[in-house]
Amino acid sequence: MAYNILLVDDSQTVKAVIAKALIMSGVDLGALFRASNGKEGLEILAKQKVDLVLADINMPIMGGVELVDRMKADGALRAIPIVIISTEGNVGRIEELKNKGINAFLRKPFLPESLKQTVDAILGGSHA
């Protein structure tokens, strides 16, 4: 089964690196949507079927924490798994996000294998 994944990060470079890591690691990709902030991410989520959201924390307009809050408050979006991928390593912030319902946290930089293991653990197994 191919997965539709939404990348939410304000850096075009980071989105390209994550997209390449997904492809290199053998994640079975359907559509790969890209947004530059949480507001754009919510607009995509309103129109597209998405199986997983990969989001940064610090972004202009709407950051990752507010995106998580909005998704968890929306009955149609609350079940979509969220992985935060960030350079921020503040233990308190990570715990706060886990309490809000994120499924995983990956610290930048990460290995493609770590991303694949995380995606497989959340979406149900290897499709490579």
Image: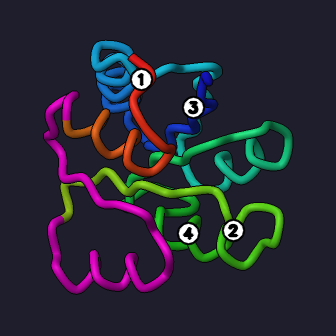
Q: How is the image coloured?
A: rainbow
- Which residue corresponds to the image point at 74% horizontal and 61% vertical from the top-left? 77
Secondary-structure class at tag 1: loop
Residue beneath label 2, please?
78
Q: Are marks 4 and 1 in contact (CB under 8 Å)?
A: no
Residue extent of the magenta highlight: 89-113
Residue at the location (49% across, 20% down)?
28
Q: Is residue 105 magenta?
A: yes
Q: Earlier in the sequence, mark 4 or mark 1?
A: 1
Q: Nearer the viewer, residue 63 or 78?
A: 78
Callout in the foreground (3, 1): 1
- Compared with 75, 12 (above or below) is above
Nearest to viewer (mark 2 / mark 4): 2
As measured in the structure, the alpha-carbon distance from the residue carrying label 1 to the one carrying label 2 is 23 Å
At which x and y percent is residue 15?
A: 40, 29
Residue that badge 4 annotates: 68
Q: Quadrant of the N terminus?
A: top right
Could you say where residue 72 lies in the image, as x and y percent from the top left?
A: 65, 74
- Rendered image: mark on residue 34: 3
Q: Quadrant of the C terminus?
A: top left
Q: CA distance from mark 2 to mark 4?
A: 9 Å
Q: Secondary structure at mark 2?
A: loop
Pointer 1: what residue?
27
Above or below for 68 versus 10: below
Whether tag 1 and tag 2 are in contact, CB under 8 A, the answer is no
Which amino acid is tagged 3? Arg
